[in-house]
Amino acid sequence: MKITFLIAFAALFCSFTHADDLQILRHWMSAATVSDEAVNAYTLDSCFQITPIPDAIFSRMQGKSYKKNCTVPRSSLRYLRVLHRNVEGKAQLGEIVCNESIAADLLDIFRQLYQKGYKIERITLIDDYNADDETSMRANNTSCFNFRVVSGTTKLSKHAQGLAIDINPLYNPYIHLNNGKVEPTTGKPYATNRAKLRNTKVPIIDANDLCYKLFIQHGFKWGGAWRTVKDYQHFEK
């Protein structure tokens, strides 16, 4: 009798959790985690979507990633909903703003990464970090569009056009080879002995990595192959 009660209670608890997760999915609460059962019920196709920039999202971007001097038309940008596996292996909701020309590529890449169980800590808009690159990278946040210049220069970055994305930037930092500066500064432990780190649970991007292979297959260039700097997190078109 006691066992039957416990089973019934567990089933009821799971049904409430399942309903809550479905609400999270329907409202697409970025960075929230949900059960695999809820994802299956909501359907994978519904979790990987491309749309024009919704008004609510564009409002979040104002004065942050979409600055007053931004020369990129809103119409050339797209909003993506994606799922990913976080570092604990849980299904987590993500969102990306990118250039229309790479939207389909990113959707396909992130869907494959999710299905293969590739771990990404978080994918939220950089506007949640006041469009500050260092702060976003320290949080290991994967992001794409941000109307800004290349670090240490006055040249517009590929991110300014929504044509570049940074993946797990804390684990895959940007390294200035001339002075040894690392961005983010907290990424220094991941700047050296990267081959050794590959044997740990940290998702290290190199030529053997699934993330690298998928981006290269889709025609992207990898910052880790550059000569004057090493930008291990960075892929661009």
Image (cartoon, rainbow, N blue to C red):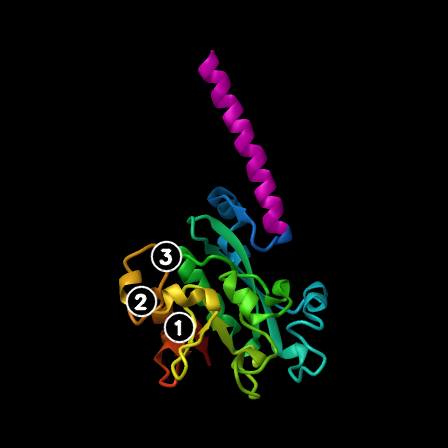
Camera-side residue of 136 and 52: 136
Instruction: Give the CA separation, mark 2 to mark 1.
Output: 10 Å
Say which element carries label 1: loop
- Give the residue drawn at x 57%, y 74%: 145
Residue 91 covered by magenta stretch: no
Camera-side mark, 2 or 1: 2
The local crowd at label 1, few if under 14, some if 14 to 19, many if 20 or more residues have their Cα within 10 Å, is many
Q: Secondary structure at mark 3?
A: loop
Query: Marks 2 and 1: CB-CB under 8 Å?
Result: yes
Residue 166, visible in the rendered structure: yes
Q: Which residues are magenta?
A: 1-26
- From the viewer's perspective, is the residue at label 2 or at label 3 nearer? 2
Q: Position of residue 9 (x, y in %)?
A: 53, 23
Residue type pointed to by label 2? Arg
Quarter location, residue 119: bottom left
Whichever of labels 2 and 1 marks the residue nearer the N terminus, that label is 2
Disc number placed over residue 194 in the picture, else none:
2
Query: Mark 3–mark 1 contact, CB under 8 Å?
Result: no
Q: Earlier in the sequence, mark 3 or mark 1?
A: 3
Q: Which residue position is annotated with label 1?
A: 232
Q: Please give the label number shown on residue 220.
A: none
Overall secondary structure of the magenta stretch? helix
Q: CA distance from mark 3 to mark 1?
A: 21 Å
Furthest-top residue in view?
Answer: 1
Q: Residue at the spot x=28%, y=68% of the render?
A: 208
Report the side of 129 relative to 92 (left or right): right
Q: Which residue is mark 3?
A: 116
